[in-house]
Image (spheres, helix red, strand yellow):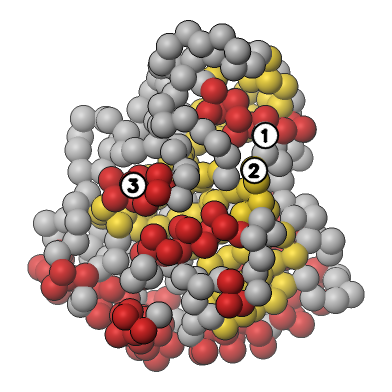
Amino acid sequence: MNSHTGTLDSVRDYYGRVLKTNRDLKTSACCTGESFAPRLREILKDIHPEVIARFYGCGSPIPSELTGKTVLDLGSGSGRDCFILSKLVGPSGRVIGVDMTPEQLDTARRHVGHHMDKFGYAKPNVEFLSGYIEDLKSLGIADNSVDVVVSNCVINLSPDKQRVFAEIYRVLKPGGELYFSDVFADRRIPKHLAEDPVLLGECLGGALYIEDFRRLLAKVGCLDYRIVSNSKLALTDPAVERKAGMIGFHSLTVRAFKLELEDRCEDYGQVAYYLGTLPEQPHRFMLDDHHVFETGRPHPVCGNTAAMLGRTRYASHFKIVGDTRIHYGLFDCGPKSETIGSESGSQPGGSCC
């Protein structure tokens, strides 16, 4: 980590000493995001006020079907998402939070007992580890040991993102899921802005150019990812806008799976049926921003989508008809969401997008 010490020290100082609560943020980057689902809003009522006040995130990266699972939160901060996940995985599940900021870790650890009492757990199912998200092996997190990796507006802060994604795919089990929210840019950030301590701390200086993100995932073997939500960020602070107003920043929630997938959506004539068996989603299941599966309704899917539904923890909730023995060419994935940096409507990466 020596070559990146300056950047990490700047981030640690910003989140440990400069910011006292999320009201001190200068932009919407680390506090924007889609509204919490009803199931999460109910849990949020039990989260300690100090944990909420000292939490800095840009979305709600908490997927469904987590009971009994092992979930890893990268850059867990004051622990808000970890404590929500603690409730969702249940007493038989496990949540691991990793952060490098002592002040944030102290806040999280002080409130473990509070949340275990609220949830009625006899013993903690959440732990907070002090370390770097670029080096999970040194924290004892083994290969193929984690069901789901989440992160909330933190990966942009890393000076070595390729190593972060490599570690994520090392620790994920086959079929495991990366589900995270972060800030992305419509171009590569100039060096002088990437090193600006305020822009870095505000989750802007380290924002990944969306095409470079696609390339990084491909390097670790992930050839298809999905956009779940996409919100353009407002630079509300005049000084920040003067520095970086020429760049388009978006908060995206992204999901990707540890699966052998193709780099394009291919058509094998497969059809997916959602069984409506997820308790919080009885009528429809949303895989991404344009794959919404209505209960019982046949939905033609590409080979990659069929794998995401049929070879992951979601498999018991779907019926997949067909296989990959006969190929019919490229699959038309249909509606396209807003891109980053364009009004044309073409999607910013990901195969089935």
- The answer for how far apart the CA atoms under marks 3 and 2 are is 21 Å
Residue 194: x and y, percent? 21, 70
Q: Residues within 10 Å of mark 2 (few under 14, many from 20)?
A: many
Residue 121 higher or lower than 189, as above or below: below
The residue lying toward the viewer, choosing from 47 and 319, is: 319
N-term-proximal mark, 3 vs 2: 2
Residue 39 higher or lower than 103, as above or below: above
Q: Amino acid at mark 3?
A: Arg
The residue lying toward the viewer, choosing from 160 and 151, is: 160
Residue under the image location 54 percent in, 54 percent down: 169
Residue under the image location 51 percent in, 89 percent down: 103
Q: Amino acid at mark 2?
A: Gly
- Residue 311: give its label: 1
Q: Which residue is mark 3?
A: 215
N-term-proximal mark, 1 vs 2: 2
Cβ atoms at labels 1 and 2 below 8 Å apart: yes
State the quadrant of the C terminus. Answer: top left
Query: Which structural element holds mark 2?
Result: strand
Does residue 7 appear left or right of residue 48 in this picture? left
Task: Please identify the quarter of the rendering in which residue 80 is found.
Answer: bottom right
Cβ atoms at labels 1 and 3 below 8 Å apart: no
Q: Residues within 10 Å of mark 1 (few under 14, many from 20)?
A: some
- The answer for how far apart the CA atoms under marks 1 and 2 are is 6 Å
Does residue 167 appear left or right of residue 28 in this picture? right
Residue under the image location 53 percent in, 28 percent down: 304
- The answer for how far apart the CA atoms under marks 1 and 3 are is 24 Å
Q: Which residue is mark 2?
A: 175
Q: Amino acid at mark 1?
A: Arg
Task: Please identify the quarter of the rendering in which residue 58 is found.
Answer: bottom left
State the quadrant of the N terminus. Answer: bottom left
